[in-house]
Image (cartoon, rainbow, N blue to C red):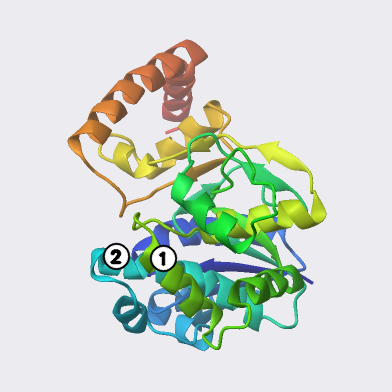
Amino acid sequence: MRLICIPAIKSHLKYVTFTISYLEKKFLNDQIIIVTPDQNSFMHLNNGNVSVKTDSEFLDISPEQIKNNLSEDKKSMFKWYYQQFLKYSIVIKSKKYEDILILDADTIFLSDCIEDSDCINFTLLEYNESYFKIIEKYFPSHKLMSKSTIVNFMWFNRILLLNMLDIIQGNQKNNWFEVILDNVNKSKSPFAFSEYETYSNYKHNINLPEQKDLKIFRRADLFLSFYSFKKIIEIAKIFKFDLISFEENHNRSLSKKIIVFFMKFIIELKLLFSGYYTKNNNSIQQSNKFN
């Protein structure tokens, strides 16, 4: 039996509900947990092989403590670092399981991309050099991957992660997350560490696993102003995306919105030429015949 975990907050409820329905069909014999500070919001999903647990069960440091440990120019990022450390802590403390799948709560999965626990998945839409600088510091002899593995999910091997964190911690008395925060403070960029990028690069150098490129519909949250949640999923399937990411807390600048309007034009052309609207009109007419 493996463990599938979704760290989530209350605003993720719609996405998590959809994902749980998907997971219950795909992972019949595996345990699924939702880890959240908002247990009451998710308790209706607590049944069968799905359980809801509080985030404080896993991490030995609070968001406020992380904030206090960050330098002034990075304090605004404390929640971002907290959720990264929480993922590692879930894997570490889940001692019954060898392999643990962590899923980002704001993401909808459409393909079978999350089923292969040995594969490393890539995206061409993310690449932050500052993430790799900190990896070079911890593992100077390792070969860095040329593409990003921030694909909103990751299969972790518990023993492999523990070995990686032992190297990061070294002979220091501080905990692994304190060591990471100390190095984050020394970085010029506030985005100085990635839990996914660090682990996948370590895994790549130790195991040399299979690799696969994924097609990701990013910033789908920006399309919610003119498409319904259901229609966004239909669109993503037409474009053959592997997953959809609704990153509601990310950059919502004017430039992003302009890009979205341009993308909407491309999407509408694709829907028109794919026969999407014709099929929908025919379905409505057929339905009306029986009413």
Which residue is rendered at x = 40% and y = 79% of the image?
37
Q: In the rendering, at what x and y percent does residue 261 appear?
A: 27, 25
Give the quarter of the image for residue 231: top left
Q: In the rendering, at what x and y percent does residue 201 appear?
A: 65, 53
Q: Which residue is mark 1?
A: 184
Residue situated in front as seen by the camera: 135 or 19 = 135
Kind of residue sitting beneath label 2: Lys
The quadrant of the image that shows the C terminus is top left
Kind of residue sitting beneath label 1: Val
Whether residue 45 appears in this view of the structure is no
Q: Are marks 2 and 1 in contact (CB under 8 Å)?
A: yes
Q: Is residue 72 left or right of residue 7?
A: left
Q: In the rendering, at what x and y percent does residue 33 appear?
A: 59, 74
Marks 2 and 1, how far apart in space? 9 Å
Q: Which mark is residue 74?
A: 2
Residue situated in front as seen by the camera: 289 or 203 = 203
Residue situated in front as seen by the camera: 140 or 98 = 140
Residue situated in front as seen by the camera: 195 or 251 = 195
Which residue is rendered at x = 34% and y = 44% of the image?
221
Q: Is residue 20 left or right of residue 264?
A: right
